[in-house]
Image: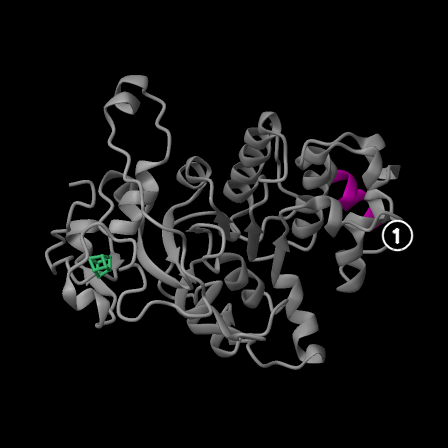
Amino acid sequence: MTTAPVAPAEAAGAPRADVPPVLEITSLTRHFAASKGTVRAVDGVSLTVARGEVVGLVGESGSGKSTVGRCAVRLDEPTSGTVRINGTDITRLPPRALRPLRKDFHLVFQDPSSSLDPRMTVGRIIAEPLRLHGMARGEAARQRVAALLRQVGLRPEHIDRHPHELSGGQRQRVSIARALSVDPDLLIADEPTSALDVSVQASVLNLLADLQRDRGFGCLFITHDLAAVEFLADRIAVMYLGQIVEEAPTAALFADPKHPYTQALLSAAPVPDPVEQRSRQRIVLSGELPSPLAPPPGCRFHTRCPVAVDRCRSEIPVPRSIPAAADGGRQVSCHLVTEDGTAPDAAV
Ligand code: SF4
């Protein structure tokens, strides 16, 4: 697919030390009051996305990953912690001050059907952010929309269609075109393919990968699809019950998951080689994900961890950095992972 950029913000490349991350989340919590108590949906998450980097955020349904994404773009208000975009703390900015910064970050939702205004044409939907941010009007906006349509693989005639006249995959392409219309530095993609037919998921993922490479935006890719995150992400953070339990470069994480939960998660992911697939040992976790209303004390994973020891039930594991030289910069929160990266084997 051809995805020549309209006006790339910056060529993709390795993160630069002299520019702030496009997204920097520090000690983020999001608690909700409920009739039975406090739902601790997100509890102390720290995460960065560098310019031009794709960070995958994975975990089971209910782990809090979508709430992190919504807090990162202020669609949800954090209970505590900070969110910085390009170095600017946006956590408590009033709406008027936040509005001009909104062109720097966009969220692509899981279900394009509910995020696109059914009364608007595709052309108007994609042009809306340009108009809101005063970036293009009239013929200039129309030309930009036409170029974006080409980039996301839609035809010129789609410009006058309404969302209901498009397939699910085409609607998600419109969502992506709208999000990228103002050249954001950060795209947060929350399960962008999970509402689509399996047959079109790969083409939308390929489109995202092409656009990210060509335009160089940072991306927080939230998903439970391990094959998709392995394909797209440079780095992966694994969430369990509101907390990040392991974070590592993608290849290192898939080659050698250290945290018992990551080991279990990856053991369920299919691999392309049928011989390897047959010989793999799946780690089946007992029980359900505990309720975020009453997270277990100590390590939150201890109620399901196959290798839990006594201290796991009372002592909260602190994130341990494993030296970059040995492992590409990994952090793991498990009592049994040592400083040199020796980890328990949850399959034993
Ligand atoms: Fe399992 Fe204990 Fe490690 Fe938690 S700290 S993952 S319960 S071994």
**Residue 278 in sight here:** yes
The residue carrying pointer 1 sits among few (fewer than 14), some (14 to 19) or many (20 or more) residues within 10 Å by Cα, namely few
Q: Against 336, is 54 above or below?
A: above
Query: Which residue is the extreme one toward the top?
Result: 275
Three-letter amino acid code at the position of disc 1: Gly
Residue segment shown in magenta = 140-147
Indicate the position of residue 337 as horizontal and vertical percent values: 16, 57
**Residue 15 in sight here:** no
Residue 222 part of the magenta segment: no
Question: Which residue is depicted at the point 45% across and 66% down?
Answer: 292
Q: Against 80, is 220 above or below?
A: above
Q: Secondary structure at mark 1?
A: helix
Q: Is residue 155 left or right of residue 315?
A: right
Q: Quadrant of residue 335?
A: bottom left
Question: Which residue position is annotated with label 1?
Answer: 138
Q: Nearer the viewer, residue 297 or 127?
A: 297
Q: Is residue 325 left or right of residue 99?
A: left
Q: Against 329, is 215 above or below?
A: above
Colouring method of the image: one colour
Indicate the position of residue 226 as horizontal and vertical percent values: 42, 39
Indicate the position of residue 131 as horizontal and vertical percent values: 81, 59
